[in-house]
């Protein structure tokens, strides 16, 4: 008499075992890929190379004085398609008082901030995209351009690595130099810093507000933005030390610009450059530091952001854009420098100004502006609701705070629609359609 055979494993158990094997293999492969990429980065391998220097590109390298140039970039309203617009430039700007708002310079900075976002596509292997920033700055007469920080911050694998390693408090940025000359023959070396907005895993850093207790301080700057800004300032310090040597920095000028996360980083970097003028080793004289930011989040809990020291920082903001309202002012957050608000729904003469903005947007992009000015009212209500339901930043970090945020967003605000008011192309069109702010 034969014994009964052992029962076969259930299919559910087999499936579970198979799933565990797949997860283990995938996890091992991911770890191997991460380690390999880290080693490539350490050795400077495996990334798209920096483009040729601007003087090697076709275009008017070395342009000086006052002129106009056509700059290409990508717009979120048109996808990856290249659009372009004309900008003004004048070397004389950098011999003028940086605390006096310069609308032409601000408008050019709005375009260069959009170009900073476009540059990422060049650094994605096989994309075929042009080197937007190098081409733009060649048109403006810059002959020394570095976009090296994009090399390991533009590929999907690199974003995954930063997420896993917790090293996403970074940005990609360009540093470019140009020798500028005034009408009276004075000369300076201008360092332009244009900072990319949120990209990939950097979105997580936007929520990393940090904890002052970790720094044994009463208040700190937003940690995710602060770390990115510190990298830029350290980079500038090394470059300027090499340029100026022991001769000082009296003939150095700095220009910072950026949109969204790039704006927050530029705002902080400019404030640090301002602070350094009060110490023993300045990056540049306070009279030669310029900063224009767009869609700038609140960046700090530190008091004194409106002090005269920071009067050279201008933050251009759209009332219908949610991003400049976060983190909440009711939590104690603010921006360094001076806030300049674009026309908003309900303001006197808004309809006429909005029509001019729409015309500029379509001229630049070839499509109609998607942004809805009436979202200003929804954003105002949302900010009020969030301040009431999430009274502190600590509450925001709790599960209840996040639930309240999501619930409020879905109740009266279409997040996709509100995002339209955040587009760099919307800011550019507003700037071009106005004479000043």
Image (cartoon, helix red, strand yellow):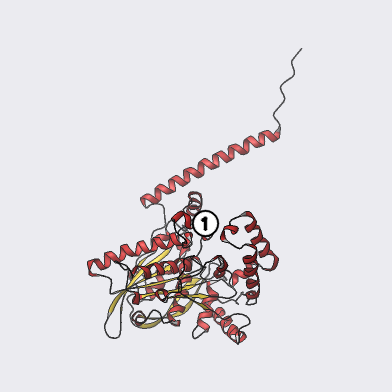
Vertical arrangement, residue 48 with respect to residue 79, above or below: above
Q: Position of residue 319 (x, y in %)?
A: 58, 76
Q: Quadrant of residue 416?
A: bottom right
Q: How many numbered callouts?
A: 1
Which residue is located at x 47 percent, y 47 percent?
A: 34
Of 179 and 299, the residue lying toward us: 299
Q: Position of residue 170 (x, y in %)?
A: 45, 59
Vertical arrangement, residue 396 with respect to residue 343, above or below: above
Of helix, strand and loop, which one carries label 1? loop
Which residue is located at x 48 percent, y 78 percent?
A: 85
Of 388 and 131, the residue lying toward us: 388
Quadrant showing the N terminus: top right
Of 227 and 168, the residue lying toward us: 227
Residue reaching furthest to the top: 1
Of 2 and 332, the residue lying toward us: 332
Neighbours of disc 1 within 10 Å: few (<14), some (14-19), many (20+): many
Which residue is located at x 57 percent, y 67 percent?
A: 330
Residue 409 appears left or right of 71: right
Q: Position of residue 392 (x, y in %)?
A: 58, 61
Residue matched to label 1? 201
Residue 281 appears left or right of 9: left
Q: Position of residue 236 (x, y in %)?
A: 34, 65
């Amino acid at each position: 008499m034969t014994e009964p055979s052992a029962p076969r494993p259930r299919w559910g158990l087999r499936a579970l075992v198979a799933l565990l094997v797949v997860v283990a293999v995938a996890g091992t492969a991911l770890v191997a890929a991460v380690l390999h990429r880290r080693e490539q980065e350490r050795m400077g391998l495996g990334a798209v190379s920096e483009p040729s220097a601007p003087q090697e590109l076709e275009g008017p390298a070395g342009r000086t004085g006052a002129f106009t140039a056509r700059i290409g970039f990508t717009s979120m309203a048109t996808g990856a398609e290249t659009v372009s617009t004309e900008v003004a430039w004048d070397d004389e700007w950098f011999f003028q008082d940086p605390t006096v708002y310069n609308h032409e310079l601000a408008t050019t900075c709005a375009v260069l901030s959009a170009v900073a976002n476009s540059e990422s596509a060049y650094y994605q292997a096989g994309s075929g995209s042009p080197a937007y920033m190098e081409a733009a700055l060649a048109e403006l007469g810059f002959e020394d351009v570095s976009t090296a920080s994009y090399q390991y911050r533009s590929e999907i694998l690199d974003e995954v690595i930063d997420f896993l390693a917790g090293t996403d408090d970074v940005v990609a940025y360009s540093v470019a130099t140009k020798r500028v000359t005034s009408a009276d023959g004075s000369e300076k070396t201008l360092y332009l810093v244009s900072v990319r907005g949120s990209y990939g895993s950097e979105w997580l850093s936007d929520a990393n507000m940090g904890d002052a207790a970790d720094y044994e301080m009463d208040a700190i700057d937003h940690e995710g933005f602060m770390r990115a800004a510190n990298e830029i300032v350290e980079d500038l310090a090394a470059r300027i030390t090499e340029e100026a040597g022991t001769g000082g920095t009296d003939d150095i000028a700095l220009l910072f610009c950026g949109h969204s996360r790039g704006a927050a980083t530029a705002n902080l970097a400019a404030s640090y450059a301002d602070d350094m003028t009060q110490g023993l080793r300045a990056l540049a004289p306070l009279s030669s530091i310029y900063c224009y930011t767009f869609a700038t989040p609140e960046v700090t809990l530190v008091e004194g952001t409106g002090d005269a020291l920071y009067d050279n920082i201008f933050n251009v903001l759209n009332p219908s854009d949610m991003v400049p309202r976060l983190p909440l002012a009711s939590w104690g957050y603010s921006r360094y420098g001076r806030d300049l608000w674009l026309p908003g729904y309900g303001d006197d003469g808004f309809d006429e100004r909005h029509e001019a903005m729409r015309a500029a947007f379509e001229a630049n992009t070839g499509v109609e502006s998607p942004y809805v000015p009436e979202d200003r009212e929804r954003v105002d209500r949302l900010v009020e609701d969030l301040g009431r339901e999430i009274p502190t930043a600590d509450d925001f970090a709790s599960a209840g705070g996040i639930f309240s945020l999501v619930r409020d967003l879905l109740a009266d605000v279409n997040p996709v629609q509100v995002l339209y008011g955040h587009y760099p192309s919307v800011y550019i069109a507003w700037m071009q359609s106005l004479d000043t702010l």
